[in-house]
Image (cartoon, helix red, strand yellow):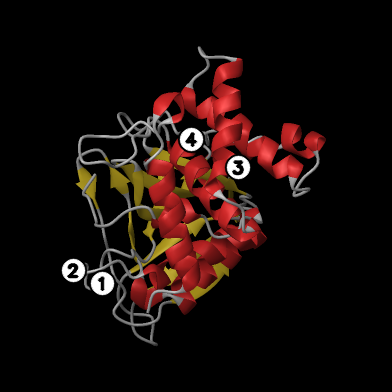
C-alpha cells in the first residue's frame, strides 16, 4: 500500500521534474532526468527526501536553486543544485557550514583497472581481518540463499549459488568457505584476509603475503541510465587482482534471477545494512530510482 510519505515524495519529484526556465532539470525524451555522474542523481534524490522530511515546499528549494544559478550562470547545473541544497541544509540547522564544507557531497571514486566500467560507484570499506570476516560471515552464513558470488572480469562472469549454508573456517590468514556437506566433501574456496605466514618449514615472504592478502574491500553499485541496477561486495588482493565479487539481492530480480513485475525494495535490506554498519550511511533514496534490471 502506498504511504503518505510515498505520495509526498512522488509529488515533490513531479514538481522537481516540472521546473521550467534556467532551473529546469535536464530531461531525456522520455521525461526522465539525465545524470552524467552517479552523484548527480544522488543529490537530487537526497534533496527531495530532505524537503519531504522537513515538511517544506518545493518552492523554497527552487528559489535557492535559481539564486545559485544566477550567481554563476556558467557553473555546471548540478554544482548549482548542490550549492542550493547545502544552503537549505544550513538554513534548517541540519549541519553547520564547516561540516558541510568538510563533507561536501562529491562523486565517489572509481576503479580504473576495469575498462569502460566507470559506472561502478565505489564505497571503500576497511580491509582488516575482523571487518572482512564480519562481512563474509554475514553474507555466507546469514544470506547464503539470496546471493550469488564468483569473479566478474571482462569476458567472464562467474555467478555461483550455494545449495546449502556454507561452512567458514580460518587457517593461516585464509578464510575457507566450504560449499560441500558436513563431512567436508565438495566445492570450496579460500580467501586470504589476515596475517599469512605459510607452513613452518616453508614460510612465505612478507612480500608474497602482502600480494596474497586482501588489500581493498568495496561496496559497489552499478549505474545504468541514471539509476543503480545492481549492488555488490568486492575484494582485491595486494596486486589489485579481483579475489571475489558477491552480487547482493537485487530489487528487480527474484532469488532465481527472474525479473520481478515490480521492484521489491525490501531486497535492498542487506545493502542498506552493510552501508550503515561499515560506512555509517543511511539508506539512499537514489538506490530506489530504477524501475527494472538492465544488463551491464
The numbered mark at residue 254 is 1
Between the C-alphas of marks 4 and 1, the distance is 35 Å
The first of marks 4 and 2 along the sequence is 4
Helix, strand or loop status at disc 4: loop
* Residue behind mark 4: 239
Q: Residue at x 35, y 77 (%)?
A: 145
**Quadrant location of the C terminus?**
top left
90 left or right, relative to 116: right
Q: Quarter-wise, where is residue 29 in the image?
A: top left
The first of marks 3 and 1 along the sequence is 3
Between the C-alphas of marks 3 and 2, the distance is 43 Å
Q: Marks 2 and 3: in contact by CB < 8 Å?
A: no
Please say if 32 is above or below 197.
above
Between the C-alphas of marks 1 and 2, the distance is 5 Å
Q: Residue at x 36, y 66 (%)?
A: 249
Q: Quarter-wise, where is residue 165 in the image?
A: bottom left
Q: Marks 1 and 4: in contact by CB < 8 Å?
A: no
Q: Nearer the viewer, mark 3 or mark 2?
A: 3
Q: Position of residue 17 (x, y in %)?
A: 38, 42
Q: Position of residue 94 (x, y in %)?
A: 74, 49
Q: Residue at x 58, y 14 (%)?
A: 72
The first of marks 4 and 1 along the sequence is 4
The numbered mark at residue 258 is 2
Helix, strand or loop status at disc 3: helix
Q: Nearer the viewer, mark 4 or mark 1?
A: 1
Closest to the observer, 105 or 132: 105
* Residue behind mark 3: 60
Closest to the observer, 137 or 178: 137
The numbered mark at residue 158 is none
Q: Marks 2 and 1: in contact by CB < 8 Å?
A: yes
**Quadrant location of the N terminus?**
bottom left
Amino acid at each position: 500500500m502506498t504511504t503518505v510519505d510515498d505520495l509526498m515524495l512522488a509529488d515533490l519529484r513531479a514538481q522537481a521534474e516540472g521546473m521550467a526556465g534556467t532551473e529546469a532539470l535536464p530531461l531525456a525524451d522520455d521525461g526522465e532526468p539525465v545524470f552524467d555522474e552517479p552523484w548527480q542523481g544522488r543529490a537530487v534524490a537526497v534533496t527531495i527526501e530532505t524537503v519531504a522530511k522537513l515538511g517544506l515546499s518545493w518552492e523554497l528549494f527552487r528559489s535557492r536553486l535559481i539564486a545559485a544559478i544566477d550567481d554563476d550562470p556558467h557553473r555546471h547545473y548540478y554544482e548549482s543544485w548542490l550549492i542550493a541544497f547545502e544552503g537549505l541544509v544550513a538554513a534548517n540547522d541540519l549541519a553547520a557550514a564547516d561540516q558541510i564544507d568538510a563533507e561536501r557531497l562529491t562523486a565517489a571514486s572509481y576503479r580504473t583497472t576495469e575498462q569502460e566500467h566507470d559506472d561502478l560507484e565505489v564505497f571503500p570499506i576497511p580491509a582488516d581481518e575482523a571487518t572482512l570476516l564480519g562481512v563474509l560471515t554475514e553474507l555466507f552464513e546469514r544470506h547464503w540463499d539470496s546471493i550469488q558470488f564468483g569473479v566478474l572480469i571482462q569476458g567472464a562472469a562467474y555467478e555461483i549459488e550455494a545449495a546449502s549454508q556454507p561452512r567458514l573456517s580460518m587457517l593461516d590468514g585464509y578464510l575457507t568457505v566450504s560449499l560441500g556437506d558436513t563431512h567436508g566433501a565438495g566445492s570450496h574456496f579460500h580467501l586470504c584476509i589476515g596475517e599469512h605466514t605459510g607452513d613452518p618449514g616453508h614460510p612465505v615472504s612478507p612480500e608474497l603475503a602482502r600480494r596474497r592478502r586482501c588489500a581493498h574491500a568495496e561496496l559497489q553499485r552499478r549505474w545504468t541510465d541514471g539509476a543503480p541496477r545492481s549492488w555488490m561486495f568486492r575484494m582485491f588482493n595486494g596486486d589489485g587482482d579481483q579475489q571475489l565479487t558477491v552480487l547482493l539481492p537485487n530489487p528487480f530480480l527474484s532469488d532465481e534471477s527472474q525479473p520481478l513485475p515490480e521492484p521489491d525494495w525490501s531486497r535492498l535490506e542487506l545493502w542498506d545494512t552493510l552501508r550503515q554498519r561499515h560506512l555509517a550511511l543511511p539508506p539512499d533514496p537514489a538506490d530506489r530510482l530504477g524501475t527494472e534490471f538492465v544488463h551491464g
